[in-house]
Amino acid sequence: MSEVSIRTVHDVPGLGAVSAYFGEVWQAPSAPPYPAEVLHSLVHAGGAVHAAYDGERLAGASVAVFGPPGSAEVYSLVTAAESGLGQVVKQAQRAWALGLGARTMRWTFDPLVGRNARFNLVKLGGAGTEYLVDFYGPMRDGVNAGDESDRLTVTWDLAAPGTSYDPGDREAAPATHQAPDGGVLARRDPAGRHVWCRVPDDVVKLRAADPALALRWRRAVREVLTEAFAQGFRATGMSRDGWYTLTKEAAA
């Protein structure tokens, strides 16, 4: 990899390249999820498209817009980057948002994709604050087709550095749910401070190989997480072996 640079993109050819990049990532080159004209409108409205370039080659991009008036919040619509560049792109997006007065950033991601959960919750230090059932409805791109589009909302405090999370003592906690593969899906500590929930090793590969099994995982994880969020838990971490940590703050 040569020298990496981050730029904000405003011109039509540059935005077309970003749109095409998203189309490749989501395996929908003929119908990219963010057409160039939509990106151009978002930039014109005050949003930003940040792009990472390895030399002159586009290697990542992120799109964000400001939230409701007076909210001091930015909403990140989409981010994709090659390995090692996600943090660079998100930090550039963070610096832009802070410079314009934002204090928090929100976005959504597929809760079954463990590597993204670990990036969002551990590397960036965000928190999962909302579970959204079938958020987009049916999706027809090459990555999500055939599945239900549940999403987890991440809230990122832009002014505070990410902190390490407390994973708790997962193995000592009683199991509460069985996973589609026959193993333990979820555990809950008797004190009621933590819930743990496991996701499949690679849901994208699983969805391609066995869509029915991937859907069973979707609905099993949904049951655990929607119940936990309804009870006041937040997703605070993801282990390297695919377990969410959900934490409930102690009452004041």
Image (cartoon, helix red, strand yellow):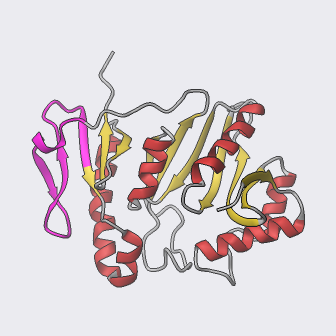
Front position in the image: 1 or 77 = 1
Residue 126 located within the stretch drawn in magenta: no
Identify which residue, 113 or 234, lies in the foreground: 113
Residue appearing at x 55%, y 38% in the figure? 156
Is residue 111 at least partly visible in the picture? no
Q: How many marks?
A: 0
Q: Position of residue 51 (x, y in %)?
A: 73, 57
Q: Residue at x 58, y 48 (%)?
A: 87
Q: Is residue 185 left or right of residue 12?
A: left
Is 130 on the left or on the right of 214, as rendered?
A: right
Q: Quadrant of the N terminus?
A: bottom right
Relative to residue 46, is residue 219 depicted above or below?
Answer: below
The x and y percentages for residue 135 are: 50, 61
Furthest-right residue in this view: 11
Please tell me in which quadrant of the rendered image residue 148 appears.
bottom left
Viewer-proximal residue among 161 and 42: 161
Q: Is residue 172 visible?
A: yes
Residue that sits furthest to the top in the current view = 252
Residue 89, image x and y in percent?
65, 50
Residue 70 shown left or right of residue 206 in the figure:
right
Was residue 176 drawn as part of the magenta stretch in this picture?
yes
Quadrant holding the C terminus: top left
Residue 100 rendering spot, x and y as whole percentages? 78, 33
Which of the 4 image quarters holds residue 114?
A: bottom left
Q: Nearer the viewer, residue 101 or 120?
A: 120
Residue lying at 51% horizontally and 69% vertically, measured from the top left = 137
Looking at the rendering, the stretch of residues picked out in magenta corresponds to 168-196
